[in-house]
Amino acid sequence: MKVLSTIKEIRAYLEQKKAGGKTIGFVPTMGALHKGHLELMLRAKEENDLLVVSIFVNPVQFNNADDLKNYPRTLEEDTKKLESVNCDVLFIPDVEEMYPQVVTTQYNFGTLETVMEGRFRPGHFNGVAIVVKRLFDIVTPDRAYFGEKDFQQLAIIKKLVAMEKIPVEIIPCPIVRETDGLAMSSRNRLLSPEERKLAPFIYKTLQEAKRRRNHICANPLRQMIINIFEGNKNFKLEYFDIVNDKTLQPINGWNDKVGTVACVALWLGNIRLIDNIRII
Ligand code: PAF
């Protein structure tokens, strides 16, 4: 595995590979890799000649200084995991390399960014879009792989690619779960052992929402699930919404022709977790 930290080096290396007709599959990450990331990588490896992974904890997407400071950084462990999936290139730029000047780009994703995460994390998706655009410009991948756990992020990235006419195919990949149902996330390692035991309640409640969909209308179901989340005092609910999977706007009734996803964000102690489940 080639480990490169400057834009000049990675561009030169990948240009040479592309000139030789190689295709590039790209998995951008912030490190603290888990099985969910590795699944994206295995798929990228299967569908492309070269697997490129970036690890960059992107300061401009954090709207909370403590969250940025506490974000797990585990490069040594990550490197071993990347070797186990035969990653070809690891790109690990530092902040000066990625942002030599102050970034002022302001994207407008319309109503995609005013709901759910957008309501609670102002500026977050603008920061994600800035770094993803920059990484795409550097790596010029044929395909890029993103997990569906960050469902809204995926919608924003698809929109970014369309708006900026970036020639890359975005490949969504299913959520990977622990055996007790907890969605894999880099943040899970920040949970205390007690919190970790409580965490499967999130997916259990989402499954309950899915089970009840044939028996109750969308709005009362939403309220019922909010009551279940709010009734558990170990958690602090930020939002639970049942949304159209393209527009991310709340739905008012079931329609078998409209893809529908239930999304949740909540706090368990000091850790913010998100998850979602497809309802239709
Ligand atoms: O999903 C993530 O890990 C990050 O938001 C991403 C896409 C790597 C951008 O920093």
Image (cartoon, rainbow, N blue to C red):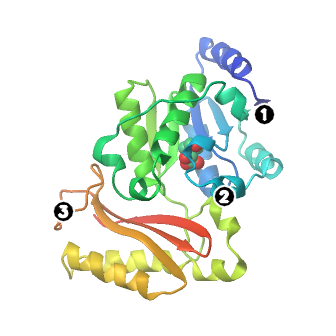
Marks 1/2: CA–CA distance = 33 Å
Q: Are marks 3 and 1 in contact (CB under 8 Å)?
A: no
Tell whether 84 sits left or right of 173: right
Helix, strand or loop status at disc 1? loop
- Residue at 68% x, 83% y is 194
Is residue 207 shown above or below 272? below
Tell whether 276 sits left or right of 85: left
x%, y% of residue 94? 73, 34
Q: As shown in the figure, which amino acid type bears the numbered disc 1?
A: Met
x%, y% of residue 212? 28, 81
Q: Is mark 3 within 8 Å of ligand 1?
A: no
Q: Which residue does the numbered mark 1 point to in the structure image?
A: 1
Tell whether 102 sits left or right of 148: right
In the rendered image, the quadrant that contains the C terminus is bottom left
Counting residues from the start of the chain, the first of labels 3 and 1 encountered is: 1
Query: Residue 132 versus residue 46: which sits nearer the camera?
Result: 132
x%, y% of residue 110? 30, 42
Tell whether 126 sits left or right of 30: left
x%, y% of residue 221? 26, 78
Q: Is residue 88 visible?
A: no
Counting residues from the start of the chain, the first of labels 1 and 2 encountered is: 1
- Residue at 74% x, 44% y is 82
Q: Which residue does the numbered mark 2 point to in the structure image?
A: 66
Question: In the rendering, which numbered label is found on residue 262?
Answer: none
Query: Residue 167 versus residue 1: which sits nearer the camera?
Result: 167
Query: Residue 18 versus residue 74: which sits nearer the camera?
Result: 74
Q: As shown in the figure, which amino acid type bears the numbered disc 2?
A: Asp
Q: Which residue does the numbered mark 3 point to in the structure image?
A: 256
